[in-house]
C-alpha cells in the first residue's frame, strides 16, 4: 500500500449542505487551479473554468445518475424491519447490498412495497454484502427504487437533502450509489460556453459503488472495489482525434480517470469497451490518456489522493491542500473544486 497523505481537516470545512442552500449557484463554488508541473496554485471560481481550457481540449464527463440507495424493507417470515444500502448493480435485477439494520440470511425474502420484493440469493462470511435478486428488472425496478429510496449520506451531512442535490445536470444512466460529485458544479450554461470556445465534450459511464461499509473491518482498498464502466465508441474516437491534434484530455472526476486508464491498460489503446474495473492508480502509475483532472477536495488519507498524485507530485499536492485549508475551501460532495492541469 502506498503511503497515505495525512493532514488535519478542520470539522467546519466539511460541506454540510449544497451550495444552492448556502445561497450560491452550483457553478459558483471556489476552484483551486493547480499547475501539475510547477505546483503553483491560483484561486478562482468554477464558472471561470473556460478561461483555463483551450480550443481543441476534450472534457470527459461521467453520465452515471445517482440512485437513492438506502431502502427500508420488512422480512416476510417475521415482519422484522431491515434497512439495506444498495452497493453495486450486478445485472438488470440483481444488486449487491449492505444490510444496515437487521440480519439477512440466504433464502430470506424482504418486501419494500406492494410491488417490490427481493430474495437473498447469496451471503458470505468474508464480506458484509448480500446478493439481492429483485422481482422486477430494468426500468420497472428503477422506478420502484427512485420512488422508495433515499440517497446515501454521511455523518457530516445532517439534513436529508433531496435526491436532486445528488445529481449532476447531465447525468442520464442510473446506477451510481454515491454521486460522481466532480461533475456536480457544472451548469448547462457553463457547458455551452465551453463548447462555444471549442472545447469538446464526451461521456463515459462508471457507476460508483458504496465506499463506506460502516465497519472498518470490512474496509477494502480500491483494488478490491470493482465498479462497472462503459467507454462508448464515439468517446474513444473523440479521444483519439483530440490526442492526434495535440489537445488535452481533461477527466471530470476520478471515476473518469479509472475508466479511461483501465481501457488503455487492457487494450493498449483507447477503444470502445465496457466491464468492471478495480484499477488502483498511484503516483507510480503512468497515465496514458488523461492530461488534466477536475475533482473535488478529498479527505485525509483517502485513496483518491493517491490517484491525484499520478497527475502532480505528492509534495506539491500536499502544499496546495494546505493552501486550500487556509483559503477555507469546503470538502466533500457539496464542497469546492480543484482543477489540476
Image (cartoon, rainbow, N blue to C red):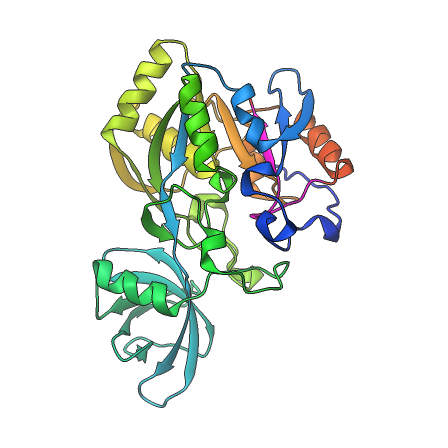
Report whether residue 309 is seen. Answer: no
Whole-percent x, y for residue 242 in the image: 35, 15
Within the image, what quadrant is residue 38 found in? top right
Whole-percent x, y for residue 289 in the image: 40, 22
Secondary structure that dominates the magenta span = loop
Does the magenta-highlighted stretch encompass residue 156?
no
Q: Is residue 184 left or right of residue 28?
A: left
Report whether residue 16 is seen. Answer: yes
Q: Quadrant of the N terminus?
A: top right
Q: Residue furthest right?
A: 326
Within the image, what quadrant is residue 238 found in? top left
| Residue 3 or residue 56, whichever sits in front | 56
Q: Residue at x 59, y 64 (%)?
A: 159
Q: Is residue 86 above or below residue 1?
A: below
Whole-percent x, y for residue 322 in the image: 74, 34
| Residue 302 or residue 43, whichever sits in front | 43
Does the magenta-highlighted stretch encompass residue 335?
yes
Q: How many numbered circles are shown?
A: 0
Whole-percent x, y for residue 327 in the image: 75, 36
Q: Residue at x 42, y 78 (%)?
A: 82
Q: Residue at x 58, y 32 (%)?
A: 46
Q: Is residue 17 above or below residue 268?
A: below
Q: Residue furthest bottom?
A: 78
Q: Quadrant of the C terminus?
A: top right
The part of the chain drawn in magenta is 329-340
Q: Residue at x 55, y 37 (%)?
A: 27
Amino acid at each position: 500500500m502506498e503511503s497515505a497523505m495525512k493532514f488535519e481537516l478542520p470539522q467546519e470545512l466539511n460541506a454540510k449542505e449544497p451550495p444552492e442552500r448556502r445561497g450560491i449557484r452550483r457553478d459558483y463554488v471556489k476552484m483551486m487551479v493547480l499547475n501539475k508541473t510547477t505546483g503553483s496554485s491560483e484561486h478562482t471560481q468554477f464558472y471561470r473554468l473556460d478561461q483555463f481550457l483551450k480550443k481543441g481540449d476534450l472534457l470527459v464527463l461521467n453520465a452515471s445518475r445517482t440512485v437513492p440507495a438506502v431502502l427500508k424493507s420488512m422480512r416476510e417470515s417475521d415482519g422484522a424491519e431491515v434497512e439495506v444500502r444498495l452497493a453495486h448493480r450486478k445485472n438488470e435485477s440483481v444488486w449487491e447490498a449492505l444490510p444496515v439494520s437487521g440480519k439477512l440470511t440466504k433464502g430470506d425474502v424482504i418486501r419494500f412495497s406492494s410491488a417490490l420484493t427481493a430474495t437473498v440469493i447469496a451471503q458470505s462470511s468474508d464480506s458484509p454484502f448480500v446478493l439481492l435478486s429483485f422481482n422486477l428488472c430494468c426500468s420497472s425496478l428503477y422506478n420502484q427504487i427512485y420512488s422508495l429510496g433515499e440517497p446515501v449520506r454521511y455523518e457530516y451531512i445532517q439534513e436529508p437533502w433531496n435526491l436532486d442535490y445528488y445529481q449532476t445536470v447531465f447525468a442520464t444512466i442510473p446506477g451510481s450509489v454515491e454521486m460522481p460529485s466532480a461533475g456536480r458544479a457544472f451548469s448547462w450554461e457553463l457547458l455551452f460556453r465551453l463548447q462555444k470556445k471549442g472545447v469538446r465534450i464526451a461521456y463515459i459511464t462508471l457507476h460508483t459503488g458504496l465506499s463506506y461499509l460502516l465497519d472498518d473491518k470490512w474496509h477494502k482498498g480500491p483494488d478490491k472495489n470493482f465498479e462497472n464502466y462503459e467507454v462508448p465508441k464515439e468517446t474513444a474516437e473523440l479521444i483519439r482525434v483530440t490526442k492526434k491534434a495535440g489537445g488535452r484530455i481533461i477527466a471530470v472526476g476520478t471515476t473518469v480517470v479509472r475508466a479511461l486508464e483501465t481501457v488503455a491498460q487492457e487494450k493498449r489503446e483507447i477503444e470502445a469497451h465496457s466491464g468492471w474495473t478495480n484499477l488502483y492508480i498511484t503516483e507510480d502509475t503512468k497515465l496514458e490518456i488523461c492530461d488534466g483532472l477536475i475533482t473535488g477536495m478529498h479527505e485525509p488519507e483517502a485513496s483518491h489522493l493517491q490517484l491525484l498524485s499520478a497527475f502532480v507530485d505528492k509534495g506539491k499536492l500536499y502544499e496546495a491542500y494546505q493552501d486550500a485549508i487556509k483559503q477555507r475551501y469546503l470538502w466533500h460532495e457539496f464542497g469546492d473544486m480543484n482543477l489540476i492541469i
